[in-house]
Amino acid sequence: MAYTTLISAAELRALHDPLVLDCSFDLADTGAGERAYAAGHIPGAFYLHLDRDLAGPTTDADGRFHGRHPLPARDTFASLMRSLGLRAGRQVVAYDRQGGMYAARAWWMLQWLGHAEVAVLDGAWDGDMTTALPAAAPSTWQPGAPLVQQISAEALLTQLGRVRLIDARAGERFRGEVEPLDKAAGHIPGAANRFFKDNLGADGRFKPAAQLRTELQALATGSVVHQCGSGVTACHNLLAMAHAGLGLGVLYAGSWSEWSADPARPIAKG
């Protein structure tokens, strides 16, 4: 069977020839994930760095800022996946050591390439670890039509007041009480707050699908735009929505880091 949202450690162990991606990262120490990978990782796993592999340049050719972690060129990411051996139908499993907050970005980006067979490891890995680096077997795979949707800042601005919008940041950042990373404090007008960590139980695993469905439906139903600080933890909420059977939603990849960089865009607080 194919896994398209979450996968347990036991289910991962039972897979034949999965493509495993270690996406561990730390925004405050951008080398921490790579060091953790070098110290020990799931056998066969390749490391993906948030800044180098799961994001593109922060500014475009015209010097316009598109957030701290804008999407890379789709062909660039497809080429990377091809070099690691992605092929049609091959199960991909992404994991990290931060409750899935970075692995979910890889999950969304594989869906963006048209590859449905991708899941995030639910909870911690409880099996053997290795320091050995895997050997890649590059493929000739080509991406298909995107399975997920995204929206630009310009398009979102025209839909304010009509679009359902969920912000995955911590409550104090959403309310504008603090802002440690971006140009201004606050949130996009009309957004509701769903801190991504609320998708997890005390055991570090995602809450049951039925519970997630109840909690997320209370915020919004139908087509929902998800954002966060830089388009990373929004994918955690998108994954939770998908696992709860509520659809794949829409990602605003630039998120607050892009939105707040332009003083002409409206900001709300509280």
Image (tube, grey):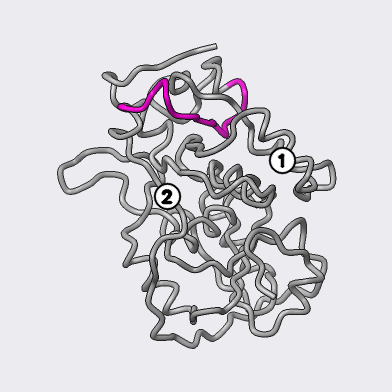
Question: Where does the magenta region start and end?
Answer: 158-172
Residue at 78% from the left image edge and 44% from the top image edge? 210
Would you call the spot at circle 1 few (<14 residues within 10 Å), some (14-19), or many (20 or more)? some
* 64 relative to 210 in the view: left or right: left
Q: Is residue 108 magenta?
A: no
Residue 190 horizontal/vertical position (percent): 48, 20
Which quarter of the figure is the N terminus placed in?
A: bottom right
The mark found on residue 149 in the picture is 2
Amino acid marked by disc 1? Arg
State whether residue 256 is above or below residue 245. Answer: above
Q: Is residue 160 magenta?
A: yes
Along the line of sight, the residue nearer the viewer: 207 or 52: 207
Which quarter of the figure is the C terminus placed in?
A: top right
Residue 63 horizontal/vertical position (percent): 19, 41
Amino acid marked by disc 2? Gln
Disc with the residue nearer the chain's start (1 vs 2): 2
C-alpha separation, residue under disc 1 versus residue under disc 2:
20 Å
State whether residue 13 is above or below residue 47. Answer: below
Q: Considering the numbered disc 1 on the image, is that residue within a helix, a strand or a loop?
A: helix
Q: Which residue is mark 1?
A: 213
Residue at 46% from the left image edge and 54% from the top image edge? 148
Along the line of sight, the residue nearer the viewer: 220 or 35: 220
* 37 relative to 183 in the view: left or right: right
Marks counted in the figure total: 2
Residue at 77% from the left image edge and 64% from the top image edge? 8
In the rendered image, which quarter is residue 202 located in?
A: top right
In the rendered image, which quarter is residue 118 located in?
A: bottom right
Residue at 40% from the left image edge and 17% from the top image edge? 267
- The outermost residue toward the left is 62
